[in-house]
Amino acid sequence: MNTAVIYNSYDITRPALRDFSSRPLPQKVYRRRRLAFLSMVGLIVFLSVLMANEIIGRIQGVPGGSVVEASGNPVVYIVQPGDTLWEIADKFNPEGTDIRHTVDELAKVTGGSNLQPGQRIVLNRGL
């Protein structure tokens, strides 16, 4: 003979749950959360601007130069007969940069594209 037991679910006592939503958190907790959130947003914005600047520089062919190149002493180049801005730029172009940028900088330094033999050009190492 089989015996079946049926329990009434309404008779089971359940533990009382406390309602924590009625108690507000201290102001220090909210300040800390705001500070952490704003710090994260600031860090994300800072890193985004840094990456965008580097990407734009690489697209234009002028990525950020190293500090060592920028702090070097200026070089004086004396123009030889037959020299062109492109030939001079090829000699002094920093590795990894577009030569057109260097030619533009040389044109600014010399005041145009006309060069005279014996002309002295003062070049910064971080062109």
Image (cartoon, rainbow, N blue to C red):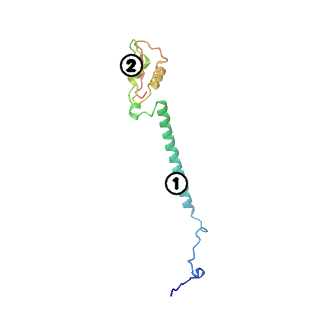
Q: Which residue bears the numbered disc 1?
A: 36
Asked if 56 appears above or below 22 in the picture, the reply is above
Residue 65 at x, y percent in the picture: 43, 33
How far apart are labels 2 and 1 at the CA level? 54 Å
Q: Nearer the viewer, residue 44 or 125?
A: 44
Residue 1 at x, y percent in the picture: 50, 88
Q: Residue at x 47, y 14 (%)?
A: 114
Q: Residue at x 51, y 43 (%)?
A: 48
Q: Which residue bears the numbered disc 2?
A: 77
Q: Nearer the viewer, residue 10 or 74?
A: 10
Asked if 32 appears above or below 104 in the picture, the reply is below
Q: Which mark is residue 80?
A: none
Crowd class of label 2 (few under 14; some 14 to 19; many from 20; radius 10 Å): few
Q: Residue at x 46, y 26 (%)?
A: 101
Asked if 76 appears above or below 26 in the picture, the reply is above
Residue type at tag 1? Ala
Residue 12 at x, y percent in the picture: 57, 81
Q: Are circles 2 and 1 on residues that touch, CB within 8 Å?
A: no
Disc 2 is placed on an element classified as strand
Report how many numbered discs are placed on residues in the image. 2
* Labels 2 and 1: the sequence-earlier one: 1
Residue 46 at x, y percent in the picture: 50, 44
Asked if 19 appears above or below 5 in the picture, the reply is above
Disc 1 is placed on an element classified as helix
Residue type at tag 2? Tyr
Residue furthest to the front in view is 1
